[in-house]
Image: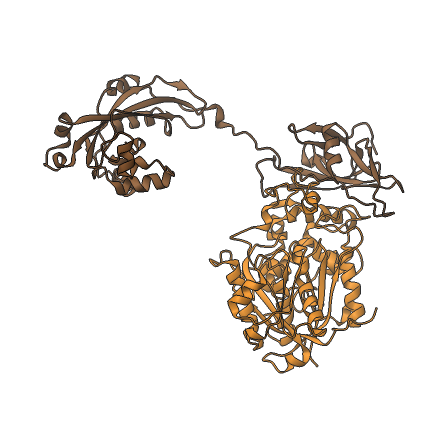
Amino acid sequence: MPTEFPDHSDALAKLVGEPSGPVELSPEAVNSAMIRHWVEAMGDRNPVYLDREAARAAGYRDVIAPQTMLQAWIMKGLRHTLDLEAARAAGTVASNDANSTMMALFDDEGRTSVVATNCDQSYVRPLYLGDRLLVRSSIEAISDPKQTGLGHGRFATSLMEFFAVSNEVAERGVSAEELVSQAELVGTMRFRILKFRPGTGATAVVAKPPRPRPAITEDNAFYFEGLRAGELRIQHCTDCGTLRHPPLPGCGTCTSLNWDYVVSEGKGELYSMVVNHYPQVPAFDYPLPIGLIELDEGTRLVANLEGDPESWAIGQRATAEIRALDDELSLPFFHHDDTQED
Amino acid sequence: MTSHAFAGKVAIAGIGATEFSKKSGRSELRLAVEAVKAALDDAGIHPSEVQGTVTYGTDTNPDVDIARSLGFDDLTFFSRIYFGGGAACGTIQQAALAVNSGVADVVVCYRAFNERSGNRFGAGVQGRAPIANAENAHLASYIPVGLLTPAQWVAMAAARYLYSTGATSEDFGRVAVADRKHAATNPKAWFYQQPITLEEHQASRWIVEPLHLLDCCQETDGGQAIVVTSVERARDLRQDVVIVDAAVQGSAKGQDMMTSYYRDDLCGLPEMGVVARQLWETSGLKPSDIDAAILYDHFTPYVLYQLEELGFCGKGEAKDFVKDGRIELGGELPINTHGGQLGEAYLHGMNGIAEGVRLLRGQSYNQVEGAEKVLVTAGTGVPTSGLILGKDV
């Protein structure tokens, strides 16, 4: 059970509406080089982003930036982010803005894991070459604690308001805060995250992947079909009567290619066995005992053994129980045969 | 059976290998090219003289890529042998057949892979797409059950062997101890200067009962090549001549790939019996003529099986044969003097052939003094192959 965590609801409520940090000015104006990279990467062939004639034909005064680039214009790049992270870790930058405070409170509540859940953008007007963007961010909402599939957490929504000024205005040396007051709102973005306590969600137990599938050919299909029908089938030569397993197209005893099958009683003797420890494949539980069972009909087969591996020894009697693992695959599992002692 | 036509007329003229590592940092093809070049240099044969190539069906390095990399001229023979490590000595047989029949004068056999840093055989076949063909259908009996790795396939037979013969895990361990003892004095071996004790073998963790970690060979990045030509030609070359006295393949009734669980018993390797029968009959030699043996050792149990199938001891007697240092240097039958695949490197058996050659040239780090006949085997549990190599006299 997780330890007791403090509840910072009151302190968090005070942060709602606060600016997340200072207003930021985009490093450069909207430009065709970045647009070209974006549309190439996205595979967006709409000509209005690069071709002035096409843009005009579509009713714009010039080429426009793809609307979804809204946030891209103010991003400062990976190096900046890494440097900032390093500086924070070293304690050389203050992290007392509202966003940092909120994150620290979440962490203190034990909500150290994070996942981005939503990102919604709305656009007021298209962005044209030469527009210089400003962004003002604030904390719009912090939810009450909620039990989610991922864990016990809170949702936090950041509101980012994007403004545009012309490049000339931006270059006048006025502060970003002051520029915003004379700028035009061009779009908004709401970014929602979930901060949660790791290991407290419904998905904390990862579903076991299904067992790897057998390759089915015309030669062995009857065997796996039989298992799905609840039958352990053994191939039978209709000319000389020899039983054989694993399935093959021909009879090694008489060379006949004619065959059908008999249904085994599913009883036999453990001829050999192993207990698998490594490597551990996620579809199976380990230690994994596997037996080579000599059926009373005379053929052998490899199958899983039930129960404690230590309870099994070569020579013991075993009985098959056919179980469906899923819609596609059924297999025989052998358990100790209690009805017969030898 | 009489002697094979090539017996005594074909020689191994060159051997060459890369270093043996856990991460080569080079492509598998580069390893193959390096090994082939080293083997040709060892022989003193120019690449343009190579007329034939042989490799494994599982090797990823096309002969033509090696040919282009090293400037080979026209090739008149190119062959591949399937069944994993069972191919090892079979490559030499293919080369011998080609050389002796006049199809190709110089044939290079090679095997190279990044088996540790790349595709690890020990990881298992659970990721194999269930495409409908016979090779995959063979695995259908084992994949859904979780019997997925070579260690697990061998362990199923080994458990029955212990039950039937009264051998113990310690008897398997004695093979590992001998191999690691030899590797400890072979600077090329991955486990150079790292011998183990039987206690360490017993204390190593289970991989798949009844096999401990130290029953299982390591995984390796590396390449090994062998140059085969006529005895006549070899006598004019750089190295002492090593003669192919016998080179044979064997697959036996009820044969399966790694999972021959449906024969009368699981205490033999009948395919190695087929190899043994031919080795003795075509060479005219007998077990007591053999000075050292390189026995395929991906997993220790099958070394015991091989000692029995090859006639070095009787059925069920290998557990006694491996005792008292008999298989170690100075013993009655030193095995795997390079350290084997457990100690030197897992090169699908190809490095064992090279060690056989070194023993006959007097170049082994663990030289068996006066060695004149060395027996080499290939992968076990699969259709396999074997060699008897002899000193030129």
Quarter where residue A333 is shown = top right
Say which of B56 and B167 sits in front.
B56
The brown-tinted chain is A
Seen at 59% across and 67% down, the residue is B225
Seen at 80% across and 48% down, the residue is B263
Percent across and percent down for residue B77 are 65, 68
Seen at 57% across and 64% down, the residue is B64
Say which of B305 and A239 sits in front.
A239
Percent across and percent down for residue B362 are 62, 76
B257 vs B336: above or below: above
Say which of A61 and B383 sits in front.
A61
Left or right of residue A316: residue A282? left
Quadrant, the C terminus of chain B: bottom right
Task: Name chain B's colour.
Answer: orange
Kindly give the residue lying farthest to the bottom in the view shown: B236
- Residue B35 visible in the shown view: no
- Residue B391 visible in the shown view: yes
Say which of B362 and B116 sits in front.
B116
Percent across and percent down for residue B52 are 63, 69
Color encoding of the figure: by chain
Percent across and percent down for residue A154 are 36, 21
Kindly give the residue lying farthest to the right in the view shown: A240
Quadrant, the N terminus of chain B: bottom right
